[in-house]
Image: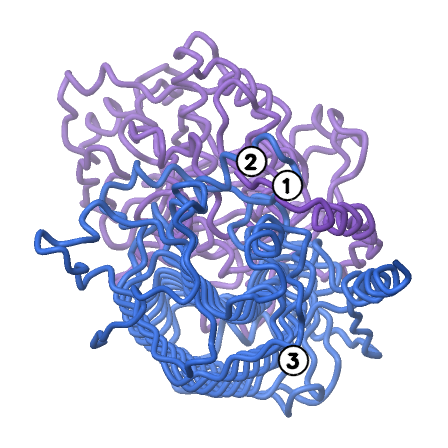
Chain colours: A purple, B blue
C-alpha cells in the first residue's frame, strides 16, 4: 500500500521502527485481595427487603436441608442448566393457590403474581474433597406486582437454616475435579440482575417450554414436566407439535447435533446478557439459540468494548480456529477483567470449553 | 553527516520516552459490606455520602433501578474508592436502569474493567470525579474511565481521567450528551463519542493521550451517531504510544492525533486549539479505510486493527459527511509525525516535513457527486480555517494517486 520513494526517509523509518520497539509491560503483579469472610446469621436490617430466614417461607417440611416440598411447591429441572462452578441445583416453583402458569412460546413462561422460583445450590458428598456435601445457598425469584425480586439466602454450617444476605458472601470450596480450592461466591442482590435482566427488568432465565420439556420424578413416577403441570391444572396444555421440541442437553450427545448442543450451551450461559433485550446488547452480540444471523452470532464480528478481554484477538468467532476466537478465549479465563460470563464463575468449565472448541473447529 | 546523526538522536530521544506513572499513596480501609448494602437499600431521592478516606472493594458497587439518587464524596483525592485486585465483576461502579443519578466529588481507581459504567439510564451527571489506574500507564489497565452507554441526558463535567487503555471519557450509543470542562490525559483516547446523537464536547483539556478527541460511528450496534459539536477545547501533545489491547478499534489511532472523525454525520468542530499533536491535527476518515487497514494487518502484525465486516450491517453508512471545521487554531512544533504506525510513515513519505493539519482519507461514496457535478451535501467536508493551515485529501482508495494538498474540495459551506 505504501511505497517508499526516498531512501533516507526509509532509513529514518527503519531506525525508528527498531529503536521504538514496544516494551509491553508484564507487570500484573497485584494479587487478588483477601476477601473478608462474613459471618452467617440473621441480619434484622434486611427485614425491609424480605423475610430474613428461608424457613419462614414454609417451602419445605421436616428437616429443612432435605428440601421436602410442601403442597404447592413443585420440583422441576431444565434440559440445559447454567454452569455455576459445578454446583448442582435443585429447583422448585411455588405457585399461589388457584393460579396458573401461562404458556409463552420462545420465551420464559409467564408466572402469576405471587409465584416464587426456588433454586438451591449444593455440592454432593462425592463432589467435595472432604466428602461433606452441603447446600451453599438458595436463591429466590419472587414475582411481585410490578416485577420480580431476587433474594439470596446463605445456609449455615449446621444446615439448619439459610439467612438473607444482600451484600454477597464468599466461601472456600475444595472440589474433587479441581486441583485448587475455589472461592465460591454468592452474588449480591443486585448481581442477580446482572444476569436476570430483560429490557431493564428482572426476569427468570431458565423455564422456557423447551427447557421444561423433559421427564422428572413425581411421586416416584417418571413423567413429562409439561404434562405433569397440565395434569395438575397448573398450566395450560402444550400443543403436541411443540412437545416434539426439546432443548438439547449440552452434556448429552444423544440430545442433539454438535451445533445444537453448542448453541444450547451459548444460549444458557451467555444469551441472558448477549441478546437484543439483554444487558450486553451494546456489544451487538446475540447468542440466542434461535439467532440465525452469523454476524451477530459473532462470526467475524469485531468486539466493541472488550478492552483487554479481546486477548489481542480480532473477532468473536473465527470459524475453524477456536484459539483465534475471543469467545473461546474469554470462556477459558477466570480473570474478572477478561472472563465470560462476567460473574458467577470462579473456575472454568472444561466440558463446556471442549464443546465450544469442537463446535468452532467444525464451522466453515 | 554529524548533523544528521544528532538530528536522529534527538528525535529518538523525544519519540521513545517512557510511559508515564501515577503512584499515589494509599492506606485502605474496608467498608465493603456496608457500602454494598447501602447501594442496594438506598431509596429514591436519597443521598449516599462517602466520607474522606481510602476504601478498597473486592467487587463492583452497583446502583440499579433507582431514581434521583446522589452519591457524593468529600472531593477528588479525598474520598478514594479503589478496586485494586478486584476479585469479582468487571466494573468498579455500575449504574444501570436508573433515572436522574448524580455522582460527584470522589476518585475511583483500578477497576478490573471500567472504572464507572452507566448503562440504560436516563439522566446521569458525573461531576468532579477523578478516575485513574495506578502504576505505569499500560495495556493491562481497564478500558474506560467514565463510560455512559445506552443512556440519555448525560452530563460529564469537571472530571479528571487518566490511564484508560481505551478511552478516558467514552460515551457510546447515547443521546443528548454534554462533556465539558474535563481534563483527560494518559489515555489511548482522551474523549470519545461513539454512535451517539446530539453530543456537545467543549471546554475540555485533552493532552498527552494517543488521540485527543474522537468521534466515531461503528457498524453493528444498537444505534448510529450524528449531530456532534466539538468546540473551545484545548487539544495538545497527544503523542502517547498507543497502548490499547489488540482487537480494539482505538488501536488504529496513530499516536500524535489531535482529533479523529470516523464515519460520522453532522459534525462541527470550531474554536478549538489543536496544538503539537505530531501526526495530524484533525483526521476525517471512512470505515472503508479502517476496513482496508484491517485486511492489511493480517499480513503485518504490528498493526492493532480489527474491524467488522461493515457490509453486513445494511443500515450502516461508512462515510463521514456534513462536516464543518472552522475557526480553530492549529499549530505543530514537530516536523515529523510519529512513525510507529502506517499513517505516520505515509505522511512523512508524502508530505516530508510539511505536515498538513487537517487530513481526509478522500474515499468517496458512489453518490459523492450529484448529476450536475456538484458535491452531494450529505458528504460535504468543509474547512474554513486560517489560510496558513495546510489541509490534504489522501485519495486512499487509489493508492494515493489523487493526493492533494490544500484541495479546493474543502472550500464550501454547510449548515449543521
Judge by depth and name the residue closer to the eye, A181 or A20. Answer: A20
Q: Secondary structure at mark 1?
A: loop
Say which quarter of the image contains residue B288: top left
User: Residue A196 at x, y = what percent?
Assistant: 41, 50
| Residue shown at 50% from the left, 42% from the top | B293
Badge number at residue B374: none
Q: Are marks 1 and 2 in contact (CB under 8 Å)?
A: yes
Distance from Cα at disc 1 to Cα at disc 3: 28 Å
Q: Is residue B224 visible?
A: yes
- Badge 2 local density, few (<14 within 10 Å), some, or many (20+)? many
In the picture of the structure, the residue carrying the numbered disc 3 is: B107
The residue at 62%/80% (across/down) is B130
Mark 2 sits on what residue?
A326
Residue under pointer 1: A311
Q: Quadrant of residue B159?
A: bottom right
The secondary structure type at the circle numbered 2 is helix
Farthest-out residue, top:
A254
On screen, residue B13 versus residue B346, left or right, reads right
**What residue is rendered at 24% in x and 59% in y?**
B379
Amino acid at each position: 500500500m505504501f511505497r517508499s520513494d526516498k531512501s533516507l526517509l526509509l532509513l529514518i523509518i527503519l531506525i525508528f521502527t527498531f529503536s521504538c520497539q514496544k516494551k509491553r509491560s508484564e507487570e500484573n503483579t497485584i494479587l487478588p485481595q483477601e476477601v473478608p469472610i462474613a459471618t452467617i446469621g440473621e441480619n434484622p436490617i434486611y427485614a425491609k427487603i424480605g423475610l430474613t430466614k428461608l424457613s419462614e417461607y414454609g417451602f419445605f417440611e421436616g428437616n429443612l436441608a432435605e428440601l421436602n416440598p410442601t403442597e404447592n411447591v413443585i420440583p422441576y429441572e431444565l434440559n440445559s442448566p447454567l454452569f455455576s462452578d459445578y454446583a448442582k441445583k435443585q429447583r422448585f416453583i411455588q405457585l399461589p393457590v388457584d393460579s396458573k402458569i401461562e404458556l409463552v412460546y420462545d420465551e420464559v413462561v409467564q408466572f402469576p403474581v405471587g409465584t416464587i422460583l426456588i433454586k438451591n445450590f449444593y455440592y454432593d458428598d462425592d463432589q467435595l474433597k472432604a466428602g461433606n456435601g452441603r447446600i451453599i445457598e438458595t436463591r429466590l425469584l419472587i414475582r411481585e406486582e410490578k416485577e420480580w425480586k431476587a433474594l439470596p439466602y446463605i445456609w449455615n454450617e449446621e444446615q439448619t437454616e439459610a439467612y438473607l444476605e444482600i451484600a454477597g458472601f464468599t466461601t472456600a470450596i475444595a472440589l474433587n475435579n479441581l486441583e485448587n480450592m475455589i472461592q465460591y461466591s454468592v452474588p449480591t442482590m443486585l448481581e442477580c440482575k446482572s444476569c436476570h435482566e430483560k429490557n431493564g427488568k428482572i426476569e427468570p432465565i431458565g423455564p422456557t417450554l423447551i427447557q421444561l420439556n423433559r421427564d422428572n420424578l413425581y411421586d416416584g413416577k417418571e413423567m413429562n414436566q409439561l404434562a405433569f403441570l397440565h395434569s395438575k391444572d397448573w398450566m395450560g396444555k402444550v400443543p403436541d407439535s411443540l412437545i416434539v421440541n426439546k432443548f438439547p442437553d449440552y452434556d448429552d450427545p444423544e440430545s442433539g447435533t454438535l451445533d445444537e448442543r453448542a448453541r444450547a450451551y451459548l444460549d444458557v450461559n451467555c444469551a441472558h446478557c448477549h441478546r437484543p433485550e439483554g444487558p450486553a446488547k451494546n456489544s451487538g452480540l446475540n447468542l440466542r439459540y434461535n439467532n440465525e444471523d452469523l454476524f451477530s452470532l459473532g462470526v467475524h464480528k469485531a468486539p466493541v468494548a472488550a478492552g483487554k478481554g479481546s486477548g489481542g484477538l480480532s473477532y468473536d468467532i473465527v470459524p475453524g480456529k477456536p484459539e483465534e476466537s475471543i469467545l473461546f478465549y474469554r470462556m477459558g479465563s477466570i480473570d474478572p477483567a477478561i472472563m465470560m460470563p462476567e460473574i458467577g464463575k470462579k473456575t472454568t468449565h472444561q466440558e463446556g470449553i471442549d464443546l465450544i472448541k469442537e463446535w468452532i473447529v467444525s464451522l466453515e | 553527516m554529524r548533523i544528521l546523526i544528532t538530528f536522529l538522536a534527538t528525535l529518538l530521544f523525544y519519540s521513545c520516552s517512557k510511559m508515564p506513572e501515577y503512584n499515589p499513596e494509599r492506606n485502605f480501609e474496608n467498608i465493603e459490606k456496608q457500602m454494598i448494602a447501602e447501594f442496594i437499600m438506598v431509596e429514591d431521592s436519597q443521598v449516599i455520602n462517602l466520607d474522606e478516606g481510602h476504601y478498597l472493594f473486592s467487587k463492583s458497587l452497583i446502583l440499579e433501578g433507582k431514581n434521583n439518587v446522589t452519591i457524593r464524596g468529600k472531593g477528588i483525592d479525598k474520598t478514594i474508592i479503589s478496586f485494586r485486585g478486584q476479585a469479582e465483576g468487571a466494573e468498579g461502579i455500575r449504574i444501570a436502569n436508573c433515572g436522574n443519578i448524580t455522582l460527584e466529588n470522589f476518585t475511583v481507581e483500578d477497576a478490573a474493567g471500567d472504572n464507572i459504567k452507566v448503562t440504560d439510564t436516563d439522566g446521569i451527571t458525573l461531576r468532579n470525579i477523578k478516575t485513574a489506574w495506578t502504576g505505569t500507564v499500560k495495556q493491562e489497565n481497564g478500558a474506560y474511565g467514565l463510560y455512559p452507554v445506552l443512556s440519555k441526558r448525560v452530563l460529564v463535567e469537571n472530571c479528571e481521567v487518566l490511564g484508560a487503555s481505551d478511552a478516558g471519557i467514552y460515551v457510546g450509543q447515547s443521546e443528548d450528551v454534554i462533556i465539558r470542562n474535563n481534563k483527560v490525559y494518559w489515555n489511548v483516547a482522551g474523549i470519545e463519542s461513539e454512535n451517539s446523537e446530539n453530543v456537545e464536547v467543549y471546554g475540555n483539556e485533552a493532552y498527552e493521550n494517543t488521540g485527543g478527541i474522537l468521534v466515531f460511528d461503528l457498524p453493528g450496534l444498537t444505534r448510529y451517531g450524528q449531530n456532534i459539536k466539538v468546540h473551545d477545547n484545548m487539544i495538545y501533545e497527544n503523542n502517547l504510544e498507543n497502548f490499547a489491547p489488540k482487537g480494539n478499534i482505538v488501536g488504529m489511532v496513530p499516536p500524535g492525533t489531535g482529533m479523529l472523525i470516523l464515519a460520522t454525520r453532522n459534525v462541527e468542530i470550531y474554536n478549538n486549539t489543536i496544538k503539537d499533536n505530531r501526526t495530524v491535527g484533525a483526521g476525517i476518515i471512512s470505515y472503508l479505510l479502517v476496513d482496508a487497514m484491517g485486511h492489511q494487518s493480517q499480513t503485518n502484525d504490528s498493526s492493532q486493527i480489527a474491524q467488522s465486516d461493515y457490509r453486513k450491517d445494511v443500515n450502516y453508512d461508512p462515510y463521514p459527511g456534513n462536516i464543518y471545521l472552522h475557526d480553530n487554531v492549529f499549530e505543530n512544533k514537530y516536523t515529523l509525525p510519529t512513525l510507529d504506525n502506517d499513517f505516520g510513515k505515509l505522511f512523512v513519505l508524502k508530505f516530508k516535513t510539511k505536515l498538513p493539519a487537517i487530513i481526509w482519507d478522500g474515499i468517496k461514496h458512489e453518490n459523492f457527486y450529484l448529476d450536475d457535478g456538484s458535491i452531494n451535501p450529505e458528504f460535504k467536508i468543509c474547512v474554513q480555517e486560517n489560510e496558513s493551515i495546510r489541509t490534504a485529501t489522501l485519495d486512499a482508495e487509489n493508492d494515493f494517486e489523487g493526493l492533494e494538498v490544500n484541495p479546493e474540495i474543502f472550500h464550501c459551506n454547510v449548515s449543521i
